[in-house]
Image (tube, rainbow, N blue to C red):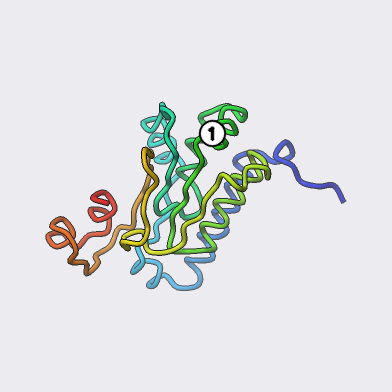
Amino acid sequence: GAELSPKMLSKKEIDKWSDLYEQGLAYINKIEKKEMGKYYTPVDVAQVMGKFFLPLDGQALCDVGCGTGCLILEVLNLLSKEEARQYIRQHELFLYDIDLLAARICQEQILFLYGEDLKDYIHLNIGDFLQDTIILPPNCKVISNPPYCKISLTRTIIKKKTKDWYAAFMEK
């Protein structure tokens, strides 16, 4: 059989990988998904956020709560393939998510589209982003669509007042 390559598949076809994961989540347990704040970022929203995110200005790229990669993939898609590859090699990508499967889907899509040779420049950080042990790299630029749900955190003023994951992600 013929091997798949990015030339054979369109960005729209690759986006279906994320859609399949999201459908699986919805099928498995809607309540658990809602409690964890897992919501898919629509492509049109990701496109607008990606445009606001540019220019990159030589900073490491971080997607906290990356899920299957809708946001970071849109940012990279706004660059030429070679610009994206060069940026990843020079400044690296940091992907954060509590869901290992979702983060691996994100990483694999990036590697498929931009090259397997970039694997050492894409760092997966699996765990609760709000834990003190998870630290952003210095001089980074962060894009995120954090979870939308209530939490019980008491570490800082914003978290104490709002008990909202979105505010907690923005504060960190």
**Residue 32, image x, y percentages:** 39, 72
Residue occupying the point 39% across, 34% down: 48
Q: Is residue 56 left or right of residue 16?
A: left
Rendered location of residue 143, percent (x, y): 38, 42
Q: Nearer the viewer, residue 124 or 73?
A: 124
Residue located farthest toward the front when viewing the structure as drawn: 138
Q: Position of residue 169 (x, y in %)?
A: 29, 53
Q: Residue at x 76, y 46 (%)?
A: 4
Q: What residue is shown at x 31% (from left), y 60% (from top)?
A: 130
Near-viewer residue (90 or 149): 90
Q: Which residue is mark 1?
A: 90
**Residue kind at label 1, given as amino acid type:** Gln
Count every numbered label the image shows and give the total. Answer: 1
Q: Residues within 10 Å of mark 1 (few under 14, many from 20)?
A: few
| Image quadrant assignment for residue 128 | bottom left
What's the residue at 50%, 59% (across, down)? 22
Dot 1 falls on a residue whose secondary structure is helix
Pick the front one: 40 or 147: 147
